[in-house]
Amino acid sequence: MSASKTTLSLEVFPPKKDDNFANAFSTMDQLADLKPSFISVTYGAGGSRSKNTVEIADYIQNKLGIPALAHMTCVGNKKEDIDAVCTQLADANISRVLALRGDRPADMTDEQYNGRDFAYASELVSHLKEHTDFTLFGACYPEKHFEAMSTRADLMHLKQKVECGVSELITQLFMNNDVFYDFADRALAAGITVPIHAGIMPITSVKQVATTISLSGTSIPKAFSDLVARYGDDPEEMKKAGIDYAIRQMQDLIDGGVDGIHIYCMNKPKTTASIVSALSF
Ligand code: FAD
């Protein structure tokens, strides 16, 4: 948290099929109108389709002139694969990487998992710090990463990751700002002083509650479950209520001096624009 102005950034995902790039580019064009300080592009945990991440990041960086932040996961990648993606990113003039471990793919054997080249994101960060000039971002979890033994252990691992060379952090999505403020205080007390971007996902349908929210382990505050109880049967009203909740959540964070708002925008330019236009930074 700082006294300087809160930044706005967005997360997008690349097309899953190679023939969907025209659609994706049009989505990026519309999101660019919101003038985010950067747009991050997700990456498959197994490392397959990494070229789609590079291609979308290249478009954002070089065609739209907006800084692109390329996500990179290492759980399913050998060092040589990581180095090859780094070369592609550097060739495309992309200088920001979100260094992640990634989740273990369901089809990965114990032998493959235990023999992975990078055990944790911090090892990927050290490798990238040594061999590239990228500015490195890392992920953090206000409600604790699901594998960590304790909140304290998770925070110590996060500190270690930052010390390996992370310059900025982006949080997992959360719906209760008190959880974030508590995390930001604990991070600062532990000596983590890099900017923290608050990751917010607008929840606009009941289906998203059942999928995204439960998968991410995010707790749902009563204020939001009350909205679901009230509007859950009416998709249009649910969407409006979800957008309104996200706006109120983000405005509170901006007023509270958060370093950055990072919208998990799910490639939805209209919903994202309606939220951004309601915020005062
Ligand atoms: P790490 O920082 O390695 O942490 C993973 C776990 O290991 C934590 O519990 C941590 O406490 C523990 N740990 C760390 N170091 C040690 C150590 N030395 N000893 C013991 N335990 C340790 N996934 C994708 O597949 N693609 C994406 O594009 C993607 N983007 C994301 C963006 C954001 C902002 C966030 C928050 C998550 C994203 N994810 C993505 C999900 C992420 O890959 C998973 O949450 C994954 O399980 C953890 O990745 P990490 O980089 O945070 O791991």
Image (cartoon, helix red, strand yellow):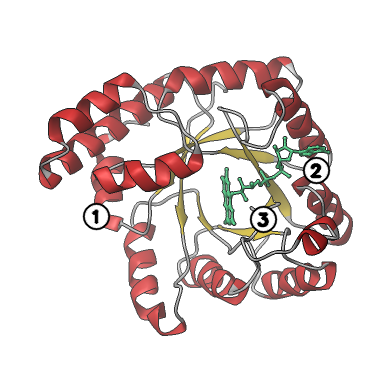
Badge 3 amino acid: Arg
Residue at numbered disc 1: 270
Say which of marks 3 and 1 sits in front. 3
Residue 270 in the image, given as x and y percentages of width and height: 24, 54
Task: Judge by depth and name the residue closer to the eye, 114 or 61.
Answer: 114
Residue at numbered disc 2: 165
Residue at numbered disc 3: 104
The 10 Å Cα crowd at callout 1, few under 14, some 14 to 19, many 20 or more, is: few
The disc label shown at residue 4, or none: none
Q: CA distance from mark 2 to mark 3?
A: 24 Å
Residue 234 higher or lower than 178, as above or below: below
Mark 3 sits near ligand 1, with its Cβ under 8 Å away? yes
**Mark 1, secondary structure of its residue:** helix
Residue located 74% across and 68% down the image: 86
Q: CA distance from mark 2 to mark 1?
A: 36 Å
Residue 252 in the image, given as x and y percentages of width and height: 37, 22
For marks 2 and 3, the one nearer the N-term is: 3
Mark 2 sits near ligand 1, with its Cβ under 8 Å away? no
Asked if marks 3 and 1 touch (Cβ < 8 Å), the reply is: no
The 10 Å Cα crowd at callout 2, few under 14, some 14 to 19, many 20 or more, is: many
Residue 14 higher or lower than 34, as above or below: below
Answer left or right for 145 relative to 3.
right
Badge 2 amino acid: Gly
Residue 231 in the image, given as x and y percentages of width and height: 14, 34
Q: CA distance from mark 3 to mark 1?
A: 33 Å
For marks 2 and 1, the one nearer the N-term is: 2
Badge 1 amino acid: Lys
